[in-house]
Amino acid sequence: MLRISPYSHGGVDQIIEDMQGWAWEFVHHKAIGFEDLHPSKTEQQAIMRALYDRFDTRCTECNEAPRPSLITQLGIHDQGFFHGEIEEVEERNWHMDDATFEKTTAIIGLHLIEFAHPPGPVGNTVFCDMERLFQQAPEETQRYAQQTRMWHTEPEGASDGVEERDYAISGAVHDGVRIHPATKQMSFYVPNFWFEPEEGSTPEFVEYIEYIKEQVYDPSNQERWIWNEGDFLIWDNRNLMHTMSGGWAAGERVFNRSSIGHEKPIGVSQDLLLFQ
């Protein structure tokens, strides 16, 4: 993750003008935060579009033509669920956005417009690099992820691999790994901690998900953005899991959220000639 001061980024127009360089930094660091930027919704959307347009990753299977989605404001209603104890909220909310759909959001941007707390432990956004975890994992763990198709469900849609379900599962099925369309690197593809294999849970899956949890919960595998009002943080939803720390009440942490890229995740079961 890369943190950019106002002196270094020069404002919205300069960021867009320098986007070729920022796009390279984005691919390398996977998340870039522009401090004290205060973009309007239109400016926020323009930055996201300029970034996404730098990547020639369009193909029939993996990606529609670049198009910005509507900006959604996260406010009192949307974020009220997440207030609570700092560490408890942080541990239970690890996820990738939109991973329960056939096509998922590529890049997320958040602009903090209201925050009732000083910078510190409250309300952080925390990331775990799933590409790095895959590279560090034992070969048998990598192989299991590559060979297993997974049901991606919302938390209420599946078990954690231990408790049995007594209802039909819903969501989307994806490979256990995801290949980044720009870098061709593999990541563990983990939507949250309530997914399960397409063929049902097994002892091997329980061992796998416990390994993933252990790695994600390890502070040495985490990067933390400590917020100030006006910050604009952009991250790659294709290879980062994220969560947020608690300690705030509904209405005390309000964002404008933007996203871009409606992509079909690329797994090992797909023809990599699509990239060429």
Image: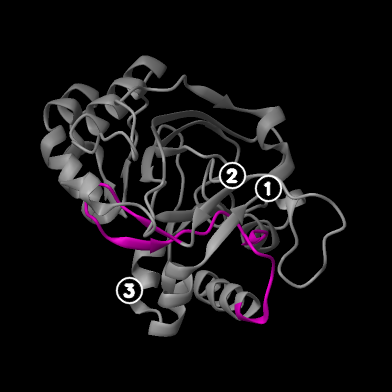
Secondary structure found at label 2:
loop
**Mark earlier in primary sequence (3, 2):** 2
Label 3 and label 1: CA atoms lie apart by: 27 Å
Q: Quadrant of residue 117?
A: top right
Question: Alpha-carbon neighbours of circle 1 within 10 Å: few (<14), some, or many (≥20)?
Answer: some
User: As drawn, is 56 to the left or to the right of 33?
Assistant: left
In front: 274, or 140? Answer: 274
Up the image or down, 51 lies above or below 27; here it is: above
Residue 143: x, y in percent? 42, 76
Disc 2 target residue: 100
Any mark on residue 135, and which?
3
Part of the protein shown in magenta: 177-204
Instruction: Tell me if I can see residue 247 in this picture.
Output: yes
**Mark earlier in primary sequence (1, 2):** 2
Q: Are marks 3 and 2 in contact (CB under 8 Å)?
A: no
Name the residue located 51 percent from the left edge and 49 percent from the top edge: 96
Please name the predominant secondary structure of the magenta segment in the image: loop
Which label sits in the foreground, 3 or 2?
2
Could you tell me which quadrant the N terminus lies in?
bottom left
Disc 1 target residue: 154
Any mark on residue 207, and which?
none
The stretch drawn in magenta includes residue 250: no
How many numbered discs sit on the rendered protein? 3
Question: Alpha-carbon neighbours of circle 2 within 10 Å: few (<14), some, or many (≥20)?
Answer: many
Please name the amino acid that badge 1 sits on. Glu
**Mark earlier in primary sequence (3, 1):** 3
Secondary structure found at label 1:
loop
